[in-house]
Amino acid sequence: MIVLVPGVPALLPSYASLDDPVADLRAACAAAVATLGPQVRVIAASAPAEKVARHLLATAGLEVVDDASDILVVGNGSAMRTEKAPGHFDERAEGFDDALRAALVAPDPAALASLDPALADALWADVAGIGAAAGLLTSELTAEVGYDAAPYGVQYWVIRWL
Amino acid sequence: MTLKLGRHTFADGATLMMAIVNRTPDSFYDKGATWAEDAAFARVATVVEQGAEIVDIGGIKAAPGVEISPAEEKARVVDFVARVREAYPALVISVDTWRAEVGAAVCEAGADVLNDAWGGADPELVDVAASYDVGIICTHTGGVTPRTRPYRIDYDDVVAAAIGDTVHYAERALAAGVARESIVIDPAHDFGKNTFHSLEITRRIGEMVDTGWPVLVSLSNKDFVGETLDLPVGERLIGTLAATSVCALAGARIYRVHEVVETRQVVDMVWSIAGRRPPQRAIRGLQ
């Protein structure tokens, strides 16, 4: 089993608010992560992404083990979907996210392995973990999408591959 | 410490707004605006809407003036407490009185807290609080007679005096049978204190918090703010809020106020700066 979650720092307890700004996302992450385990390998490409993965797994009572067969991948689409997005608006963002979504949902390991790193960087997309996991997302898997939205101008997905 | 105020309990670390409701014709700030019972009741509705957890109903102004008998004080507050109790079951009702006789009557009518602004002038007030299982506010006045102004009062150390007297009062209440979590201490700014004393109390309020007893501060529009800024009543809100923020940073729990909304914002902001309260909703930079 493989699960994708976005590395959203607002999911961390150290950044908790009284009113949870990512309540729906948090619920979707928890539901997907709960189907993993008990041992899970984490594929994350940044310190915040790693922290989010470890927090979600710890909350679910799961153990991080480097060679486990269940995998939690951390990544997300662009951060330039709107004027108020962290990276401001970029007209290429929606197309980039649409292509990425299609490759994730298919899944299409070749497309995921060949994501344009320069464009991803330009759009502040966190796709390094997704690229690293591409070889595992073989085409016989079926994607179950638990969350697909860009509430703060950043494209998030929670996807479970069975 | 968890607070238990009559029928109501509040979690450790919760801050509370105690809104002043005067059933007086002559209090310094509102000058009788809520003297009529319906006006006072409308004031209760307003402060509840604004989020006050507590109303502090008083029938006698603090400053010297026409003597108000216990019978007259009861006539001003007892039925009013009953009316508020019935209309707002979730509201904490405090009554500002130093008289045990009045305290018993308002507890019968549904009060949750006896706010003894005059520092135990009537020794039987603690027994009333104990027998009705209500909260009590133990204030420091330097031993002055109720409704007198401070005149050439001298302290070796005003904070030590305030701590000594309020903690002694709190222990007396505890010994009388008042629940530990129902006892609050209040340095009583301006009561038995000149402006320098009240400023020092504010500066060192953390020493009162360190006693472990929950601290109430009553700063709202008082003369120490007015004298410090040379501003009349009606222009003291900003100074009041500055003092409020200092007390909040030190950890005072209850704020007796005229302006609920402004004080709540200041206390929430400072409580969050102090790391005791998460932001209401933070997402900037965390998407």
Image (tube, coloured by chain):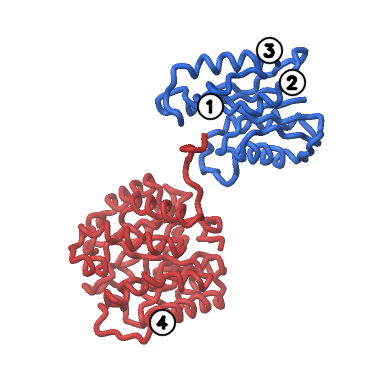
Residue drawn at the location 61% of the way across and 26% of the way down: A127
For badge 3, the amino acid type reads Ala
How many circles with numbers are drawn on the protein? 4
Q: In this view, does A43 lie to the left or right of A47?
A: right
Q: Chain B is drawn in which colour?
A: red
Chain where mark 1 sits: A
Give the structural element (helix, strand or loop) at label 3: loop
Q: In this view, does B43 lie above or below B74?
A: above
Give the residue at x 21% y 72%: B66
| Dot in front, 2 or 4 | 2
Disc 1 vs disc 3: which is toward the camera? 1
- Residue B106: which quarter of the image? bottom left
Q: Mark 1 points at which residue?
A: A121
Residue B43 in picture, x, y percent from top left: 31, 50
Q: Residue B161 carries which label?
A: 4
Which-is-in-front pick, marks 4 and 3? 3
Quick one: label 2, few (<14), some, or many (20+) residues within 10 Å?
some
Gap in Å between the C-alphas at discs 2 and 1? Answer: 21 Å
The Cα–Cα distance between marks 2 and 4, rounded to whole angstroms, is 74 Å
Q: Which of B283 and B3 is in front in this view?
A: B283
Residue B178 as seen in the image, left or right of residue B94: right
Real-space Cα separation, disc 3 to disc 2, in angstroms: 13 Å
| A136 up-or-down from B203: above or below | above
